[in-house]
Image (cartoon, rainbow, N blue to C red):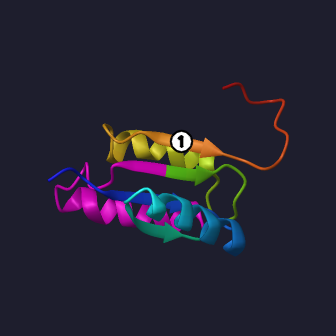
Amino acid sequence: MPNKLVMIVEDDDVIRGIARKIVERQGYNVDDFAHGLAAYRKLVELHTEGKTNHYRMILSDIDMPEMDGIVFARECSNLAEKTPVVLMTGRPRPDLRA
């Protein structure tokens, strides 16, 4: 059975809820986290258990407290190296390129 679990990392409760609904409507299950550090801790736990490809995809905000999305995405490459990470933001970021 294909992996149907997506991680969403977003500090804004409303946006996190909307993202969850959109992803669930596509038939996926969702684990959501309010900041990068909480999501990072989950990935460390899964990595320790040998579950490096637990999520089908990770969707993460860029601007968050505790651990921002850029740092979180870098850590994902060590803990879930085959899991695609999509970074999103609602703020203009001319310092970042796609």
The residue that disc 1 covers is 86
| Residue 12 in view, yes or no | no
Position of 45 with respect to 85 (left or right) is left
Q: Quadrant of residue 94?
A: top right
Determine whether the residue tagged by mark 1 lies in a helix, strand or loop: strand
Q: Residue 11 appears at what percent x and percent y? A: 67, 67
Q: Residue at x 42, y 68 (%)?
A: 31
Q: Residue 24 appears at what percent x and percent y? A: 45, 64
Decide which of 82, 71 is in the foreground and name it.
Answer: 82
Q: Residue at x 30, y 57 (%)?
A: 4
Q: Residue at x 73, y 53 (%)?
A: 63
Q: Residue 28 appears at what percent x and percent y? A: 37, 60
* 52 to 95, vertically: above or below: below
Q: Which quarter shows the C terminus?
A: top right
Position of 97 with respect to 6 (left or right) is right
Position of 86 with respect to 6 (left or right) is right
| Residue 85 in view, yes or no | yes
Q: Which residues are magenta?
A: 35-58
* 9 to 79, vertically: above or below: below
Q: Is residue 49 magenta?
A: yes
Q: Residue at x 41, y 39 (%)?
A: 84
